[in-house]
């Protein structure tokens, strides 16, 4: 079955500390991979995506993610967290074809809290 | 970037009434729009996919007679929650995509509360 697992429901880090949010997926083939961020009561903003090529992808707001096929993982990282990064983060997968944003399967999300 | 706008941002309605939520693509023509539902502190669940001029494709378990989706133009899709009940209270988010796009663009969401 196709699924996305974000093992950490809630993470708290200190401002300036590094961050890694985990994402594992189960998919029939190599999917398109996405990370989104959602502030309270808001829609989703795309942080980054992986389709092919370099397995380390850079996104907005200083985020990066690394695709590891052998581990079926797509973990999100940031070297130094800012208080404004506090939000809900969703990993998602989609089918690898044109329009691969179609029918995204989302993980349960990880809520990030940042301590000053 | 492409902008998707949802209206209203929040709505409170009485049980048994219907409420319509609009999703507009402001600066591109959306060939496909998606409607998601998000319960508090949970993930997004795809409800349906709509293509302009065609009937929406609903995900398994989603009542098509309760959640009416119309995608009459390339810039507008609507979700009507008919005969709403308190259990329909949720956060509804739309997204829109276009031919050749590598991502879908999300609206800001609509908080529906049925009292």
Image (cartoon, coloured by chain):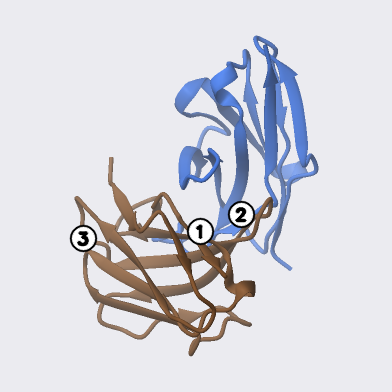
Residue with the mark numbered 2: A30
- Foreground pick, A26 / B107: B107
Q: Residue furthest bottom?
A: B65
Which residue is pictured at 19% across the width and 50% down the height?
A: B27
**Picture coordinates of residue A99 (x, y %)?**
40, 61
Q: Are marks 3 and 2 on the same chain?
A: no
Near mark 2 (Cα within 10 A), the count class, few <14, some 14-19 or many ≥20, is some
Which residue is pictured at 67% across the width and 46% down the height?
A: A109
Residue with the mark numbered 1: A96
Provide the secondary structure element on which disc 2 rests.
loop
Near mark 1 (Cα within 10 A), the count class, few <14, some 14-19 or many ≥20, is some
Q: Dot 3 falls on which chain?
A: B
Residue with the mark numbered 3: B29
Q: Colour of chain B?
A: brown
Q: Colour of chain A?
A: blue
Q: Dot 1 falls on which chain?
A: A
In the rendered view, tell whether residue A105 sits above or below residue A70.
below
Answer yes or no: do the residues labelled 2 and 1 have beta carbons within 8 Å?
A: yes
Which residue is pictured at 74% across the width and 20% down the height?
A: A13
Q: Quadrant of residue B96?
A: bottom left
User: In the shown orientation, is residue B76 left or right of residue A38?
Assistant: left
Q: Quadrant of residue A64?
A: top right
Q: Earlier in the sequence, mark 2 or mark 1?
A: 2
Mark 3 or 1, closer to the camera: 3
């Amino acid at each position: 079955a196709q699924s996305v697992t974000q093992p950490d429901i809630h993470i708290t880090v200190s401002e300036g500390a590094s961050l890694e949010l985990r994402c594992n997926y189960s998919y029939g083939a190599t999917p398109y991979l996405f990370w989104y961020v959602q502030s309270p009561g808001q829609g989703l903003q795309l942080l980054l995506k992986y389709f092919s090529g370099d397995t380390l992808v850079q996104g907005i707001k200083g985020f990066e993610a690394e695709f590891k096929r052998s581990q079926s993982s797509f973990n999100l990282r940031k070297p130094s967290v800012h208080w404004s990064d506090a939000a809900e983060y969703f990993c998602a997968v989609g089918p690898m074809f044109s329009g691969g944003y179609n029918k995204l399967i989302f993980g349960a999300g990880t809520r990030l809290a940042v301590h000053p | 970037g492409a902008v998707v706008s949802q209206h209203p941002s929040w709505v409170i309605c009485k049980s048994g009434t219907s409420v319509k939520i609009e999703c507009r693509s402001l600066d591109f023509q959306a060939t496909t729009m998606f409607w998601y539902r998000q319960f508090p502190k949970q993930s997004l669940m795809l409800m349906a996919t709509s293509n302009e001029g065609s009937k929406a494709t609903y995900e398994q378990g989603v009542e098509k007679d309760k959640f009416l989706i119309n995608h009459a133009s390339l810039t507008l899709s609507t979700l009507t929650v008919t005969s709403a009940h308190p259990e329909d209270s949720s956060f509804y988010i739309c997204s829109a995509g276009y031919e050749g796009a590598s991502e879908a663009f999300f609206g800001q969401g609509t908080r529906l509360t049925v009292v």
